[in-house]
Amino acid sequence: MSRRRLLGASLGGVGGALLGLSGCGAGNGSASAGTDHLSIWYWNGALSDKLLATAGRGVPGVPGLKVKGAPIAGDYESKVRTSMAARAYVPDLVCVNSSIAEFFPDEQEFLDLRDLGATALEDQYLDWKWKSGITPSGRMVGFPLDAGPTALYYRRDLFEKAGLPTEPAEVAEATSTWEKYLGVGRTLKARAPGRPYLVSQISYVFRMVLYQSPKQFVDADDHFIGDQDHVKHAWDLAVETYRQGLSARVLDTTPDYNAAVSRGRVATMINAVWAINGLKQVAPKTSGTWRLTALPVGPTNYGGSYVGITRYCRDPEGAFAFLKWLLGPENQLKAYQEMALFPTTPAAYDKPAMREPDPFFGGQSPVDVFGPAAEKAPVIFRSPYEDTANTPVFQELTNVETLGKNPDRAWRDAMNAAESALSQRGVS
């Protein structure tokens, strides 16, 4: 299950009217009257309900400060942008998803958190995560919320039946490169009962390989670099996975995906920590058969969120005090226990609450894999135009996998579509 699917599902069924949660902007952006609290916008599952309930009664250690909010239903990001563009009903604080770079052109809509004292807290947070909330001009608009470190999920029982290594350290060695990983896939398909596939879909191979690169589709000067080797390498590995018949060719937005995973037709997953909950929901009867180990080549990050303070905030110092409390190491640990939000504060990784064995993974502690991955993830430059550029590429990969489109033609079509879409936004 993809992070986008999880968020889409959670947003669709949530109450909370847009105007009813106003508390900051009204008309020209001036503060709304008649409220005794700061407001925060977020989507369902983004923040701890328990911690927000506490903040609604009063933020501990900050006398007189209350922060209240309820999840926003529907297209969350569009509602945030609409309120900011209209300068009406803008909240004091706002959650921003992993696509925070898309807000960088509108950085003046946010306060620079360093002006409020954020720099003094920097060493408590993951370095790459901290830097990813800073705009190219140097303004910090996003405070680290959660992270999405990645790993290789694998079916130990299927590996054993195929005569492959089974313990996490051994499997990490056997899959230390993407080429070795595909070799393991060939062995699984040839020897394991039911001839299981290595992956559910090739887009995950493309994504994880690409996310291991510090460069993506558009550089800091707003130039398209999606036709360069770092993207083509990821494309070629994904296509090779398809050509070798190692993909089940099921999209994770379909019931076929659930069936493939629950019935052992997919032997591995390359995904982020937040995929754990989806896996447990989709394939509960496979509990105990899964294990976790390092991603081939090295770790990266997929997903994770931020919190920003809008420029209309009525009490910036109070809002920042709330952020320090809500997203400090102690409360990030509580959010992990309550909602599996992976902390961006490494100090939490050694706490007993994060080290509890998980029966679903045969008694493994997931943090033993995801903790080091989070700390070693690369610093990636993401342009505000990344989704504009990469959407046609993912679509063409799907066309290769599900429609049998010629990969070379699909690559050319993807590049042409990406450059055309970017040119409409002024990116060369």
Image (spheres, rainbow, N blue to C red):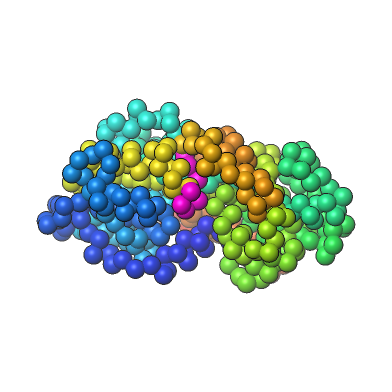
Q: Position of residue 405 (x, y in %)?
A: 70, 66
Q: Is residue 195 above or below residue 230?
A: below
* Residue furthest to the left: 33
Report the side of 133 relative to 396 (left or right): left
Q: Residue at x 73, y 42 (%)?
A: 168
Q: Tell how many labels.
A: 0
- Res 409 visible: no
Q: Is residue 282 above or below residue 238?
A: below
- Res 294 visible: yes
Quarter placement of the N terminus: bottom right
In magenta segment, residue 312 = no
- In the foreground, 207 or 230: 207
Q: Position of residue 105 (x, y in %)?
A: 35, 46
Q: Residue at x 79, y 55 (%)?
A: 157
Q: Is residue 107 above or below residue 84?
A: above
- In the foreground, 425 or 90: 90
* Residue furthest to the bottom: 255
Report the side of 31 relative to 408 (left or right): left
Q: Residue at x 15, y 59 (%)?
A: 27
- In the foreground, 354 or 88: 354
Task: Specify the segment rendered in magenta.
Answer: 337-344
Q: Position of residue 200 (x, y in %)?
A: 69, 61
Q: Residue at x 50, y 34 (%)?
A: 346
Among the 4 quarters of the image, the one containing residue 284: bottom right
